Amino acid sequence: MTTQAPPVHPDAPALSVRDVTRDYRRPRPSLLRAGEPVRALRGVSFDVAPGERFGIVGESGCGKSTLLRIISGLDQPTTGSVHVEGTDLTGRNDRQLRFLRSRLQLVFQDPMSSLDPRMTVRDIVAEPLVAQGLGPSRDRVVELLEAVGLRADAADRYPHQFSGGQRQRISIARALAPRPRILVADEPVSALDVSVRAQVLNLMTDLVDELDLTLVFVSHDLSVVRHVCDRVAVMHRGEIVETGPVDSVYDDPQHPYTRTLIAAVPTLSKALAGATAADLTRGEAS
Ligand SMILES: Nc1ncnc2c1ncn2[C@@H]1O[C@H](COP(=O)(O)OP(=O)(O)OP(=O)(O)O)[C@@H](O)[C@H]1O
């Protein structure tokens, strides 16, 4: 069975988030008292154009994970709407959810916990294809492994037999398997050794360019976002306080919180500047 997607709206933004709020309730402190309400997202709105690389930055607890869960259809907003390529995902049905999964794929922070240790790399990479009823294709798996700088014989091995950087390459291969149009990366290099972060980032951005993908890139580290993205949204306490092209936000921040954030984050730029050209090629699959 193949997935029959609703028509893609050619002029629509790749992703459109409108006035999204998300309320939670903290756990009950006692049997007699209700948990405190928490507003994790407060009227979040932005558009991401097709082919754009859009960064979302903010400190821990600002609502980035909540926003990503909503964008990727794993959670529903309390109010507001999310459109992926013009299709409204709010109050979606199964058909729309299948459409979303075929168009938008996630790369998570920690490849060790997001890859099933009992599955071979072949089965991991083929999983989204099987989930869509497309069946595992040996050639497609090899093509994907090679695209992320791994050898074909990686397919018969298990995640624990790889380094952290290689495991993240496997995650990227899996995300690309169903030929998505939008890649959503949630802190994709934060769990990796500093020495391999640049390689994985460059691999990801090269593939985004080659495959003409839209990238939504979430990080607490502004220097990584500057390296990767065209435009950035700065989140603070559930709100977007500033949005703009990376250079203008970094060189001339308007919001006091953005200024504090820019002053506070450690820089990856030094690591990137110090990396040799060979380090930065995708062939160095460490
Ligand atoms: N399921 C939940 N129940 C109650 N409160 C929640 C829940 N999920 C998130 N929150 C609260 O919502 C706010 C935003 O959390 P969220 O995890 O989205 O932030 P974050 O920026 O992704 O942080 P981190 O980088 O640490 O994951 C926090 O105050 C958090 O405690």
Image (tube, helix red, strand yellow):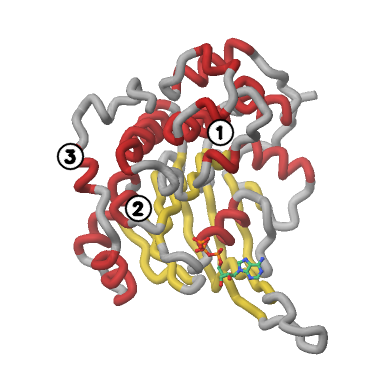
Quarter of the image for the C terminus: give it. Answer: top left
Mark 3 crowdedness (10 Å alpha carbons): few <14, some 14-19, many ≥20: few
Q: Residue at x 32, y 57 (%)?
A: 222
Q: Residue at x 56, y 68 (%)?
A: 19
Label 2, secondary structure: give it: strand
User: Label 2 belongs to which residue?
Assistant: 231
Q: Between marks 2 and 1, how big is the CA–CA gap?
A: 23 Å
Of badges 3 and 1, the one in the foreground is: 3
Query: Which residue in the rendered view is the most extreme toward the bottom?
Result: 32
Q: Position of residue 107 (x, y in %)?
A: 52, 41
Q: Nearer the viewer, residue 261 or 210?
A: 261
User: Label 3 belongs to which residue?
Assistant: 274
Does residue 143 sit above or below 206 in this rendering?
above
User: Label 1 belongs to which residue?
Assistant: 175
**Mark 2 C-beta to ligand 1 under 8 Å:** no
Does the residue at mark 3 contact the one at mark 1 (Cβ under 8 Å)? Answer: no
**First-in-chain label (2 vs 3):** 2
Label 3, secondary structure: give it: helix
Of badges 2 and 1, the one in the foreground is: 1
Does the residue at mark 2 contact the one at mark 1 (Cβ under 8 Å)? Answer: no
Does residue 229 sit above or below 143 in this rendering?
below
Three-letter amino acid code at the position of disc 3:
Gly
Mark 2 crowdedness (10 Å alpha carbons): few <14, some 14-19, many ≥20: many
Q: Nearer the viewer, residue 219 or 249?
A: 219
**First-in-chain label (3 vs 1):** 1
Determine whether, in the image, residue 72 is placed left or right of residue 277: right
Q: Nearer the viewer, residue 235 or 12?
A: 235
Of badges 2 and 3, the one in the foreground is: 3
